[in-house]
């Protein structure tokens, strides 16, 4: 049985719960989420060598993306230049290690945290709303993980290569550890959040705030916004911006299909209710 269909709390119905009962339920959902996050953060912190490998892999020539493009042809082959990561302050390594462990733990525990959120929200929904949202935990988790992997294996190598090769005067490229780790996080974690677009459109269409006609009408405006968003998430590299822009365009088109289906189902349901009335 899917996780999002399991109700382990056995909470009373919405109408039987007081405001304090809701707060108590929310508190325990938050406590379990934080505990899971902390546990995975500790595990990740202990597995320091693995975490260091994950962070340094995008600047290594044996990274799968570099190997893939080099195997295609010499014209598409590219590698980042060799550079060293420096440390500017005494606590920088320790603080960066903690921050990287927490972010990596957040990525790993995202499905569980979202499941806890869903378990809190689910009792307040009507039966048809629960049915409509079936599989939402799996969908959101899959989209998030897909976005993170896309950012890591597609955006990271192009971004690292561009930024490391960029020259502005006679200067040596020696980024400090905190800046380098922040860049890797910036190229991966936000991409996972951006990939939630179809889910957001689904629920906005369910409540009537968005229609497929609206999405079609403002498709050009959405393209401009997507390009701006890609420019914010990625470095000022046209290739990298299009690498994240193209899947966002595809997700936007998928969102139109989802919205059209939601609206169509709502209209058919309304017709059936009209026919069934005496």
Image (cartoon, rainbow, N blue to C red):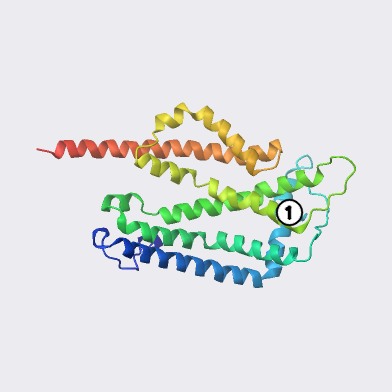
Judge the density around disc 1: few (<14), some (14-19), many (≥20) Cα neighbours within 10 Å: some
- Residue drawn at x 55%, y 40% is 248
Q: Quadrant of the N terminus?
A: bottom left
148 w.r.t. 104: above or below: above
Task: Give 253 or 186, whichever is nearer the viewer.
Answer: 186
22 w.r.t. 81: above or below: below
- Tell me if 214 is positioned left or right of 81 in this view: left
- Residue drawn at x 81%, y 44% is 165
Tell me the quarter of the picture where residue 119 sits.
Answer: bottom left
Q: Would residue 143 be seen by someone viewing this image from the given angle? A: yes
Task: Give 214 or 154, whichever is nearer the viewer.
Answer: 214
Q: Position of residue 262 (x, y in %)?
A: 35, 40
- Tell me if 192 is positioned left or right of 156 in this view: left
Q: Position of residue 108 (x, y in %)?
A: 55, 62
Q: Quadrant of the C terminus?
A: top left
Q: Which residue is mark 1?
A: 179
Tell me the quarter of the picture where residue 249 sits.
Answer: top right
- Residue drawn at x 46%, y 68% is 31
As drawn, the residue found furthest toward the right would be 170
């Amino acid at each position: 049985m899917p996780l999002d269909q399991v109700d382990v709390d056995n909470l009373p119905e919405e109408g039987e719960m007081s405001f304090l009962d809701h707060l108590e339920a929310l508190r325990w959902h938050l406590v379990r989420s934080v505990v899971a996050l902390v546990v995975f953060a500790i595990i990740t912190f202990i597995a320091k060598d693995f975490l260091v490998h994950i962070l340094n892999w995008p600047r290594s020539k044996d990274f799968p993306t570099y190997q893939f493009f080099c195997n295609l042809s010499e014209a598409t082959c590219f590698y980042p230049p060799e550079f060293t990561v420096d440390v500017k302050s005494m606590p920088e390594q320790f603080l960066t290690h903690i921050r990287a462990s927490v972010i990596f733990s957040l990525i790993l525990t995202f499905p569980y945290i979202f499941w806890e959120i869903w378990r809190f929200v689910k009792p307040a929904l009507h039966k048809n709303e629960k049915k409509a949202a079936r599989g939402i935990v799996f969908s959101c988790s899959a989209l998030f993980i897909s976005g993170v992997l896309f950012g890591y294996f597609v955006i990271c190598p192009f971004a690292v290569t561009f930024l490391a090769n960029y020259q502005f005067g006679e200067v040596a490229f020696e980024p400090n550890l905190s800046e380098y780790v922040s860049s890797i996080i910036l190229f991966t974690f936000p991409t996972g959040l951006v990939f939630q677009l179809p889910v957001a459109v689904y629920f906005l269409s369910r409540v009537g705030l968005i229609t497929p006609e609206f999405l079609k009408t403002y498709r050009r405006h959405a393209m401009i916004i997507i390009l701006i968003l890609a420019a914010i998430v990625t470095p000022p590299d046209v290739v990298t911006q299009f690498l994240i822009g193209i899947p966002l365009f595809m997700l936007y088109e998928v969102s139109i299909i989802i919205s059209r289906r939601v609206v169509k189902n709502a209209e058919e349901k309304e017709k059936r209710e009209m026919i069934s009335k005496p």
